[in-house]
Image (tube, rainbow, N blue to C red):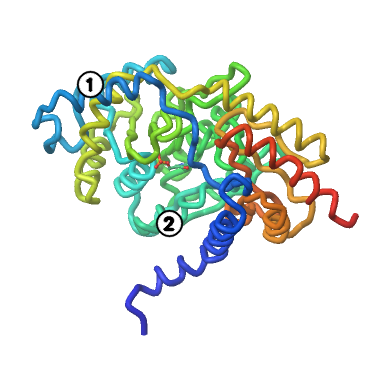
Amino acid sequence: MTSISNKTEKFLEEGSWIRKMFEQGIALKKEFGENNIYDLSLGNPILSPPKEFFLNLSKIANEKNPSNHRYMPNAGLDETKAAIASNLNKSTTTNINKENIVITCGTGGALNVALKTLIDPNDQVIIFSPYFVEYKYYIDNHSGKTIIIGHDENYLPNFQQLDSAINKKTKVILINSPNNPTGVLYKKETLTKIGNLIRQKQKQFNSEIFILSDEPYRKIVFDNLETPNIFEFHDQSIIATSHSKDLGIPGERIGFIATNPLYSQSNKLINGMTFWNRALGFVNAPALMQRVIAMIQDSAVDIKSYEQKRDFLYSSLKKIGYSVIKPEGAFYMFPKSPIPDDVKYSEMLQKNKVLVVPGVGFGAPGHFRIAYCTTDEIIEKSIEAFKKTFDNIKR
Ligand SMILES: Cc1ncc(COP(=O)(O)O)c(C=O)c1O
């Protein structure tokens, strides 16, 4: 007999090893001091939000206008939706307008609202390994069925598997680019292939299959690359994103959903999502933040600084001998574990004071994830530990 549901019990148990690792990390920090443990396990960015963020935040707070802080339409403020649409239009010719936008409590809120609106119980949602840990829970929240597809050697979707997995119950294909945990960017060729395959399957099954594009790292891309806009590749497509990473404000819980204006039932989608934004209990995204982000859609954290961190970490790990794909965006790296057991290797790294997350947590055992959204000092100091752990393996 227990007070919590069997499902909660099961999910907590599934995640217990990751909690154990985090707890061990906290204990290590207590023992040796924060700065002597090289914590590369958390995607909590340390870069400062841009100065325009602080300027507008204090300006709006100082207005001391009570109506700034009241309830509002559940989809958000018109001026904010218009500013978001105009910024998104720089990456597409589809002509997004404010009626295509719902402002949400981060990407997490956006994904839950979108999935709730789209899926009936047992509808299938396809995700690709390695995947963001929360996807399975978000899909389960709305009684969907998660189908996991593997990857090729570049961590792009395995198209053969995808082809045979899509059936008449498939409602959503959830993609994430730039990707957490690999840093891989889905380029035009990959998105064209996904779009073509979906349209072929829609015809075959006389169904509608949506691409739900999870893209909180859209602006964090390197080497002068750009994140293609998914609306160019499939009409039934939805963007779910936030300013957690590009403005460095994950604690403020502000993001949005955009629907493709080329989709004939876009209005219906927006009505559904607006309803669920309310009925899932979010009601509306934080009012103060909506006013701030309306003013700074063209701003971002110092993306060059992430690129420099990537360059340093990537070349250092390669020099040691790690096998790793060079990330093109986000702030993660996903090296192969030099031993098959990634949990064991992560524990070995932990003994040398580096904290990472084993790949099994992302559905890709045999790897580990490094989050390099931390200080240069911590990254630099971690290199010796990566080398020591690597060199200690008996080969
Ligand atoms: C791939 C991915 N999706 C969604 C989220 C959730 O982000 P948010 O803070 O916008 O809810 C994260 C956060 O790390 C993420 O990495």
- Looking at the figure, which quarter contains the N terminus? bottom left
Specify whether 264 is left or right of 365. Answer: left
Give the answer, above or below, for where 257 lies relative to 6.
above
Q: Going 20% across and 28% down the picture, which residue do you hit?
A: 61
Question: Which residue is the site of mark 1?
Answer: 59
Identify the residue at the far bottom of this view. 1
Q: Position of residue 394 (x, y in %)?
A: 89, 57
Specify whether 205 is left or right of 73. Answer: right
Give the answer, above or below, for where 50 lies relative to 11.
above
Specify whether 228 is left or right of 60. Answer: right
Q: Which mark is residue 249?
A: none
**Relative to the observer, which residue lies in front, 360 or 308?**
308
Disc 1, SS: helix
**Relative to the observer, which residue lies in front, 197 or 32?**
32
Q: Position of residue 370 (x, y in %)?
A: 63, 43
Label 1 sits on what residue type?
Lys
Give the answer, above or below, for where 362 lies relative to 191.
below
- Return the disc, 1 or 2, that comes first in the chain's sequence: 1
Q: What separation in Å lies between label 1 and label 2 (alpha carbons)?
A: 39 Å
Q: Which of the four quarters of the rendered structure image does ligand 1 lie in?
A: top left
Mark 1 surroundings within 10 Å by alpha-carbon count, few (fewer than 14), some (14 through 19), many (20 or more): few
**Relative to the observer, which residue lies in front, 295 or 125?**
295
Q: Position of residue 86 (x, y in %)?
A: 32, 16
Question: Which residue is the site of mark 2?
Answer: 137
Q: Going 52% across and 24% down the picture, which residue do you hit?
A: 227
